[in-house]
Amino acid sequence: MARFVCAFSLCVICGFATSFSNAQGIREAGAELRLQSIDATFSWCPAGDVVAEIITVVGEDKNSERYRRIDIPEGFWISRTELTQSQYLSVMGDAGVNDRDDSRRICNVSFLEAMQFCEIITMKDTFLRDRGLRVRLPSVDEWEYACLAGRSSIEMAYSPGRLSKFAWFDGIDTTGVQFGKGFVDGRRNVASKDANPWNIYDMLGNVAEWCELPVNTTVVPGSGRRLDGSGQSKTEKAICGGSYYDSWRRVHHAARVWRSADKKSPAVGFRVVIYTDDP
């Protein structure tokens, strides 16, 4: 297992550890933080709220003119890319990963394994541990808020051409190039498309991402499901954003499915957030 050392580079402003819970008044959206122990860069997501259209639960018809407000009372840091294979292996060791391309996103990892990754790095990284900071998966609300990056869902205006600028999905881009499941199982390096306004990459497509609950409990019309997954098995967890395996209509900020916590898929990975236990 990798050795963990003092973790943050000087791109973070002085006083990070003592003012984390109030940081939304200090940093601009998209500010950078580097966690050196796994060579990962994070973006700051300030406290706020955004109106998000309830587009669909994957596998169901589009719902029209239904919205929910996502409220984020405190800012948080979210990794700018999906965790890569090298980052994951530096913490978890071999872990049965066959493809060792450092720049490709980790996949075939269950929710339980992603949680274990978070627990281990929180425990082993001295900077995090000494300052009461923790690593975890984003909540569904945090994930969707970071995906929208200060924009309402109306501003997203999804279309194949626009989506192809910042997401890997199953289809043909504006130049006529095939990608997605029709190209080497959709395997792509992280950050090889454009970032969103908060400097976060691959929030949509590439791999879908494990998220934690809770989430706003608004009922999805006609689905019999709530956005928090109530009514589902207690072992089912949220996977957000769509992947390289999905058509463009299934790759958007509100795309989520529910799967068993031990489920693994080449189309599912994860990213992480840093937060504090302090009130």
Image (cartoon, grey):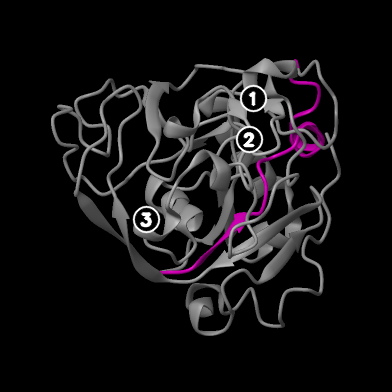
Q: Is residue 36 left or right of residue 223?
A: right
Res 187 quadrant in image: top right
Q: Position of residue 7 (x, y in %)?
A: 78, 60
In the depicted structure, whether residue 171 falls above or below residue 197? above
User: First in sequence: mark 1 or mark 3?
Assistant: 3
Q: How far apart, in angstroms, are the residues tagged by discs 3 and 2?
A: 19 Å
**Residue type indicated by callout 1:** Gly
In which quadrant will I find the C terminus? bottom left
Identity of the residue drawn at 84% across and 55% down: 5
Viewer-side residue, 122 vs 105: 105
- Give the residue pinned by disc 3: 153
User: First in sequence: mark 3 or mark 2?
Assistant: 3
**Residue type indicated by callout 2:** Trp
Task: Give the magenta-colored segment's residue range.
Answer: 73-96
Give the numbered dot on residue 180: 1
Q: Are marks 1 and 2 in contact (CB under 8 Å)?
A: yes
In the depicted structure, whether residue 229 falls above or below residue 259? below
In magenta segment, residue 168 = no
In which quadrant will I find the N terminus? top right
Q: Position of residue 53 (x, y in %)?
A: 29, 50
Q: Residues within 10 Å of mark 2 (few under 14, many from 20)?
A: many
- Give the residue pinned by disc 2: 168
Q: Are marks 3 and 2 in contact (CB under 8 Å)?
A: no
Q: How far apart, in angstroms, are the residues tagged by discs 1 and 2?
A: 6 Å
Identity of the residue drawn at 53% across and 60% down: 275
Identity of the residue drawn at 35% across and 57% down: 154
In the depicted structure, whether residue 108 falls above or below residue 17? above
Q: Residues within 10 Å of mark 1 (few under 14, many from 20)?
A: many
Secondary structure found at label 3: helix
